[in-house]
Image: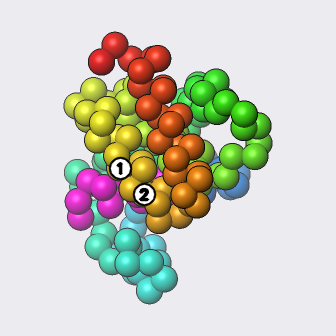
Amino acid sequence: MVRNTAREIAIHLSYELSFTDKPVEELLDERLTQESFAALAEEDPLYQETPNAKQADYIRRLVRGVADHAPELDGYIAKYAKGWNFARIPLVASAIMRVAMYEILYMPDIPHGASINEAVEIAKKYETPETVKFINGILGTFVRQETAE
C-alpha cells in the first residue's frame, strides 16, 4: 500500500467520524482490521490490501489528529471558504481538507505541495470539478497565509 492509498483511507475514516458517535479509537480499531478490509474490498478496490504496521500508524495519526483538531481545522476551512457557508460544504470535501490541513500543520516531514496535490487528486474521485477547484483554492490560500513556507 502506498502513502496516497493510506491517506485516502484516512479521509474515509475522517469522513465517517462526521456522522458516528463512536470514539475515534474505537472506529480505528474496528476499521483497521483484515476482516474489515476484506469486507470492504468487494465494494472498493482501495481496501484490497490491509495496511502494514507503519501504514496503519500513519492512518491512525491522521485520523486522530483530524479528530483532535477538528474545531481548529474547521475554523481554517470557514475562514478561507469565501462565499460558502460552512454547513453547505460537502462532508467528503471537509474530510479531504481537514486531512490535508492536519498534514500541513502537524506533519512537517510531508511537503505542503504533496498534501495539496494528494487532496486534489482524491477530491477528483469523489467531488464535482467545482468542488475540486474550491478545495484547491482553499488549501493553496491556507498554505500561503498560515505557513512560513
Secondary structure at badge 1 equals helix
Q: Are marks 2 and 1 in contact (CB under 8 Å)?
A: yes
Q: In the picture provided, is 55 more to the left or to the right than 24? A: left
Question: Which segment is the magenta one?
Answer: 1-13
Residue 37: percent from the left, percent from the top?
40, 74
Is 33 contained in the magenta span? no
Is 6 contained in the magenta span? yes
Q: In the picture provided, is 118 more to the left or to the right than 52? A: right
Q: Nearer the viewer, residue 104 or 31?
A: 104
What residue is drawn where x is 38% and y is 73%?
47
Residue indicated by mark 1: 118
What residue is drawn where x is 38% and y is 78%?
45
In the picture, which quadrant includes the C terminus? top left
Residue indicated by mark 2: 122
Q: Main secondary structure of the magenta part?
A: helix
What residue is drawn where x is 26% and y is 54%?
3
Residue 146: percent from the left, percent from the top?
45, 17
- Disc 1 crowd, CA 10 A, few/some/many (<14, 14-19, 20+): some
Q: Amino acid at mark 1?
A: Glu
Q: Nearer the viewer, residue 83 or 38?
A: 83
Q: Amino acid at mark 2?
A: Ile
